[in-house]
Image: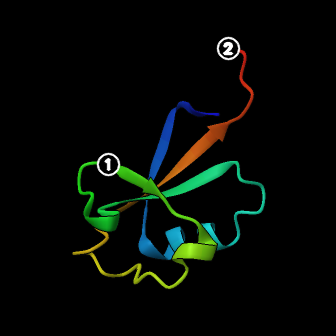
């Protein structure tokens, strides 16, 4: 599995929560910078574990991104 040509998009907290909840096909990753006090890297969010996050707390979760995933690539 790899990130599709570095395709990442910044998300608002609203869209981060919606996409995380309804991501049925696992072709996208919703990631957060600042998760678990890691302000340098992005961490993948999983609805089952992260549905109670305060997505609107800009201090704790300053940035969300959508990453498009390409699986089993032979390129």
Q: Name the image quarter holding the C terminus.
A: top right
Q: Name the image quarter holding the N terminus.
A: top right
Q: Is residue 7 left or right of residue 18?
A: left
Residue at horizontal 72%, vertical 34%? 71
Mark 2 or 1: the one toward you: 1
Q: Is residue 56 left or right of residue 66?
A: left
Marks 2 and 1: CB-CB under 8 Å?
A: no
Measured along the vertical axis of the image, is residue 69 above or below residue 42? above
Residue at horizontal 56%, vertical 74%? 49
Q: Which mark is residue 73?
A: none
Q: Is residue 62 left or right of residue 22?
A: left
Residue 10 in percent (x, y) is at 41, 55
Residue 20 in percent (x, y) is at 60, 68
Measured along the vertical axis of the image, is residue 57 above or below residue 71? below
Residue 64 in percent (x, y) is at 41, 61
**Of residues 72 and 58, the one drawn nearer to the viewer in this rendering:** 72
Residue at horizontal 32%, vertical 66%? 36
**Residue topped by disc 2:** 75
Secondary structure of the residue carrying numbered label 2: loop
Question: CA gap, disc 2 to disc 1?
Answer: 26 Å
Q: Earlier in the sequence, mark 2 or mark 1?
A: 1
**Of residues 22 and 2, the one drawn nearer to the viewer in this rendering:** 2
Residue at horizontal 32%, vertical 48%? 41
For label 2, count other residues whose C-alpha is less than 10 Å away and answer few (under 14), some (14-19) or many (20+): few
For label 1, count other residues whose C-alpha is less than 10 Å away and answer few (under 14), some (14-19) or many (20+): few
**Residue topped by disc 1:** 41
Residue 19 in percent (x, y) is at 61, 67
What colour-coding does the image apply?
Answer: rainbow
Task: Tell me if residue 18 can be seen.
Answer: no
Secondary structure of the residue carrying numbered label 1: loop
């Amino acid at each position: 599995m790899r990130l599709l040509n570095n395709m990442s998009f910044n998300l608002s907290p609203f869209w981060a929560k919606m996409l995380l909840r309804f991501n049925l096909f696992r072709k996208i990753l919703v990631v957060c910078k600042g998760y678990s006090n890691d302000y340098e890297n992005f961490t993948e969010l999983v609805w089952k574990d992260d549905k109670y996050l305060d997505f609107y707390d800009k201090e704790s979760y300053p940035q969300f991104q959508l990453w498009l995933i390409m699986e089993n690539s032979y390129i």
